[in-house]
Amino acid sequence: MEPLNVADYERLAAEKLPQMVYDYYAGGADDEVTVRENRLAWQRLALKPRCLVDVTQRDLSTTVLGMPISMPILTAPCGFNALAHPDGEFAVARAVTAAGTIQCVSTAATSSLEEVATAVPDGVRWFQLYCYKDRGITQALVERATAAGYRAIVLTVDAPFVGRRERDIRNRFGLPPGLRWKNLEPYGCDRMDAGGDGSALVKYIESIWDAGLTWDAVDWLRSVSPLPVVLKGVLSAEDARIAAGHGVDAIIVSNHGGRQLDGAIPTAVALRDVVDAVAGTVEVYVDSGIRRGSDVLKALALGARAALIGRPYLWGLAIDGEAGVSRVLSLLRAELDLCLALSGQTSVRKVSRALIAAEAQG
């Protein structure tokens, strides 16, 4: 039977993928409370539809950072796409480009940022960045992304260390032979082989990422990057205001899909305060727990410009490569379109907080 929704794709992916790979994608930190709450928080938000509105025509198109997209759904940066399918980031790039939206390519990609850009030259891509102890590596990655035509730098700010992902520890997670952190190959730090005790990811990151990152790093990044800077991993109004003061171009409200601090606030709960804090001075996007088109609609109603999906496209990739990613994007688009109509809305750009029931706004 053909999958009808993201949950169907996940069930099939759980059956198909090796346990270590499925657990790496699906798992979270500690007791995985935040993984579960991310999903439940979107479900708890109630919509208050309007009636007797002509919804014969709907418009799902919008812009992010001035870039036109066909729908307010982007693909989030997820590491090691080739664990799901041999075509990895290339398949995602082709599907995202065909869908008319934006791919955010991870530093932890199994193909280099240049290879992805060359494989799908007409695609629009952002590059997700971690900050390294060797600031020269960080700057080199920014320069490479700029030269390869990426349109924004997405700095992840919620991962000074890796959350305690017990599935990965039990599975002794690492990359199989032939797969590397391809973007880091020029700097001699691309290997993260499986084997040994615990998670190879934890050991790798503790050796190379800068855990001493402060707001000064944001200023430094803006000074070396000609591209817009997006901060990913903001959950508090206080940090959102500080980010706006440091001149970032956008914020992604994210708790890393529940993979970092277990018990962190769900993004559906954090989003409204962040939007209110920046008061339109920077664009706000959101990820973590998005599984339905109705979730995207709720995010827009709370003030997000767009939502990003991570695990959903990985499940599609695992089941059917490029076609699977395309199908997941198509399903979410169709769900969003129908929810828009049933809510009495005609454009994603006109959705307002009035669509969220008052008791669900807190």
Image (tube, rainbow, N blue to C red):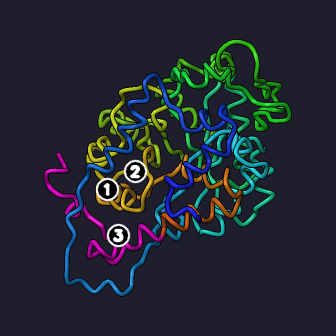
The x and y percentages for residue 10 are: 55, 49
Circle number at residue 339: 3
The x and y percentages for residue 192 are: 76, 25
Q: Which quarter of the picture shows residue 22?
A: top right
Label 2 near label 1: C-beta < 8 Å? yes
Which of 140 and 291 lies nearest the eye of the viewer?
A: 291
The x and y percentages for residue 139 are: 69, 34
Give the residue type at disc 3. Cys
Q: Secondary structure at mark 2?
A: strand
In the displayed structure image, the side of residue 326 where residue 333 appears, left or right: left
For marks 2 and 3, the one nearer the N-term is 2
The x and y percentages for residue 346 are: 33, 78
Q: Judge depth for marks 2 and 3 and give the one in front.
A: 3
Q: Secondary structure at mark 3?
A: helix
Residue at coordinates 72% horizontally, 29% vertically from top-left? 137
Task: Calculate the distance from the C-alpha at mark 1 to the C-alpha at mark 2.
Answer: 7 Å
Residue furthest toward the top?
A: 197
Q: In the image, which residues are magenta?
A: 334-362
Which of 281 and 47 lies nearest the eye of the viewer?
A: 47
Task: Calculate the distance from the C-alpha at mark 2 to the C-alpha at mark 3.
Answer: 21 Å
For marks 1 and 3, the one nearer the N-term is 1
**Image height check: is 20 above or below 228?**
above
Which residue is identified by label 1? 303
Residue at coordinates 76% horizontally, 63% vertically from top-left? 121
Residue furthest toward the left?
A: 359
Which of 153 and 77 lies nearest the eye of the viewer?
A: 77
Q: Main secondary structure of the magenta part?
A: helix
Which residue is identified by label 2? 284
For marks 1 and 2, the one nearer the N-term is 2
Task: Calculate the distance from the C-alpha at mark 1 to the C-alpha at mark 3.
Answer: 17 Å
Circle number at residue 59: none
**Image height check: is 359 above or below 107?**
below
